[in-house]
Amino acid sequence: MSLITFRSPTQGTVIMFGDDAKQLLTALNLPASGEMMTAQLPTMITRLQQIIEIDKHANPVIWPEDLNTEEDTGAPVLIRLSQRAAPMLQLMQRCLSATETITWPA
């Protein structure tokens, strides 16, 4: 399982599973590796907020790594795309405030 790391010079790092990161990058029309400039952030933040809202109202998706069970209930642990995207949204908002870019390798 691959990981993709999104970095900002001073605002932190977000590490995502490769498939989840690629899904977000595709939804945001961004390349597999690249840089998100400060000028792009307002548009990207709005788009990601829309993606998160749509996902919150959609049927949950069960990813293979989510099929672990809770010790007390035995129910599958469901992690939605909106939950996985939340740290990325926070990083984008912090970078906008600090006028910083976000970079990520393939």
Image: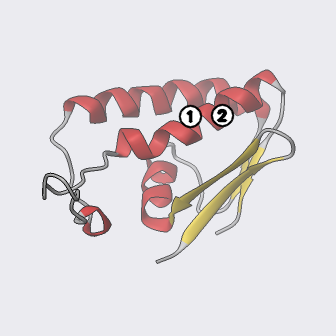
The disc placed on residue 44 is none
- Residue positioned 77% across, 21% down in the render: 97
Q: How is the image coloured?
A: secondary structure
Q: 39 or 85, which is in the foreground? A: 85
Task: Locate residue 31, reporting x and y percent.
Answer: 60, 57
- Residue positioned 52% across, 75% down in the render: 2
The disc placed on residue 89 is 1
Mark 1–mark 2 Cα distance, whole angstroms, equals 5 Å
Q: 3 or 99, which is in the foreground? A: 3
Left or right, 34 with respect to 64, comes to: right
Crowding around mark 1 (Cα neighbors within 10 Å: few <14, some 14 to 19, many 20+) is many
Q: Is there CB contact under 8 Å for labels 1 and 2? A: yes
The disc placed on residue 92 is 2
Q: Disc 2 residue type? A: Met
Q: How many marks?
A: 2
Crowding around mark 2 (Cα neighbors within 10 Å: few <14, some 14 to 19, many 20+) is many
Above or below residue 28? Residue 34 is: below
Q: 26 or 57, which is in the foreground? A: 57
Q: Disc 1 residue type? A: Leu
Image quadrant assignment for residue 54:
top left
Image quadrant assignment for residue 77:
bottom left
Above or below residue 26? Residue 88 is: above
Left or right, 17 with respect to 66, comes to: right
- Residue positioned 66% across, 62% down in the render: 33
Where disc 2 sits, the SS reads helix
Above or below residue 31? Residue 65 is: below
Left or right, 11 with respect to 52, comes to: right
In the displayed orientation, state which residue is furthest to the front. Answer: 72
Where disc 1 sits, the SS reads helix
Above or below residue 22? Residue 106 is: below
Task: Locate residue 39, reporting x and y percent.
Answer: 76, 28
